[in-house]
Amino acid sequence: MKPFTPVYIPVGVPTFHLESAQEQFERSIKLLKSVDGRFVCPEEMLLSIDKLRAYLEGLEPDLIVFQNLTFANAAYMSEVLRRFDCPVLLWTLREPVIDGGRLRLNSLTGAYSAANTLRAFDGRPFAYAFGAPEEEEVVAAVRAVTAAARVKQAMRSLKMAAVGHTPQGFGFGRALDGELMSTFGVELEAIEARELIDMAKSYSDEDCAAFLSKTECMTCGLEKTPERNRLDHARLYKAYTDYVQSHGIGALASRCWPDFFTAFGTPVCTVLSLLNDDGVAAACEADIYGALSMWVGMQLSGEPVFFGDPVSLDEGENSITFWHCGAAACTLARKDTGAEIGVHPNRKIGPAMNFGCEAFPEATVFRIGREPDGSFRFFITEGEALDKPRQFIGTSIVIRTDSDSRAVVEQSVLDGFEPHFVVLKGRHARTLEALADMFGFEVYRY
């Protein structure tokens, strides 16, 4: 994967107060480098078109922070746009002094000129920040847009897998390979669940011993699962791992019921759990856009994320419970119980994960969804994960939302969102909004 390359482009003209501009230039570089040390920055202010052209030569930016150190006309932005097609953050500096004397920077007028050119050039979306380098709002905007651009760039190297087809009535999770590529830059390949089952059946117990041992180390109570199911789980874990590693898969959505119960006799739930702990975003019920949502969440949080259905609403504590049959990552489990092993709640066959998730003070609930016309949209809400035991057989997490939880449920049902959501640690709404803007997607912020 090409290294992420954010580029700072500070433009201006020499007829304004250059001492003030130089001070802002140095402070801006300090901020950008603190956000991401990979920011490419010029050695001097770009105060002519010739200097801009010389600086841009050979660059391959994944994000451009375009800043008017002073006023600069539309030719500066035009020079950038004709060379590059990547996300842009347009940054206006606050006028440093208002004393009835000279206008020192006139950055804001330059921003209007640059923005007008951006819209007229090809209508591409761009982000905007106003203020001095140390202002909290500017820092937050730079962090969010930079993080979003990192995710967008990484997506272009992501290879996903669809393992089998969605069950009847779960068509919301289906995806076309051409659409994933054209919209997100993501490669999608498909394999039948039967192929991985056949691969698993071909292994000996000795082939899978390390996978069984790893599962024993990561979970609690596996010894209560019948030996045949323990051994078959290890076979399935090896089959998925071998496939993921040999094909370079970063995220997958796997069919689960009924095939793994009827054709194999052992569920895939715990395999998906462990894949998530291994850094591979793994969703069940063959939900491709659920898996992509998980992958985005893992990029932002740096940790496994929870994937599940909203199943319960408690207006008294303003919370929503998210649950699924038993595929949550082991590292999400409460510390007092650990990653307990149980059985699938409907089929009564194990191993499947069976625990409540740990509490954490900041949480984001997210989903890449579809409008009825096929266009994409983001579901986003924030809150905290409460200290709650397992709510139902399977895995669960209880989120107290910042906004009214009943309103979140009622409005998102009325808006027709899919029933699978991702819960990730941290507050990432602003970054997700920036990412949606880069793709031109609608944001539903609850």
Image (spheres, helix red, strand yellow):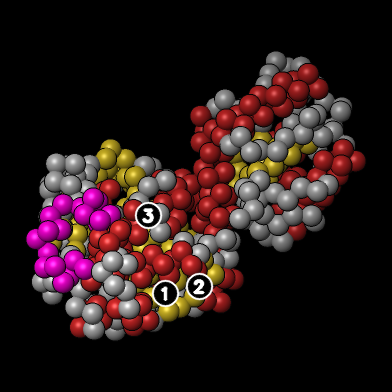
**Looking at the image, do the residues carrying marks 1 and 2 touch, with CB atoms under 8 Å apart?**
yes
Q: Nearer the viewer, residue 348 or 420?
A: 348
Q: Residue at x 19, y 59 (%)?
A: 353
Is residue 95 among the parts visible in the rendering? Answer: no
Q: Which of the image's four quarters has the N terminus?
A: bottom right
Q: Amino acid at mark 3?
A: Asp
Taking the image as shown, residue 141 lies to the left or right of residue 327, namely right
Distance (Cα) linking label 1 and label 2: 7 Å
SS class, disc 1 = strand
The residue at which mark 2 appears reads as: 188
Magenta extent: 213-231
Is 273 located above or below residue 194 in the figure?
above
- Badge nearest the viewer, 3 or 2: 3
Q: Position of residue 162 (x, y in %)?
A: 42, 74
- For the residue marked with disc 2, what is the amino acid? Leu
Q: Are marks 3 and 2 in contact (CB under 8 Å)?
A: no
For label 3, the SS is: loop
The residue at 56%/49% (across/down) is 150
Under tag 2, what secondary structure? strand
Q: Quadrant of residue 108?
A: top right
x 14%, y 41%: residue: 336
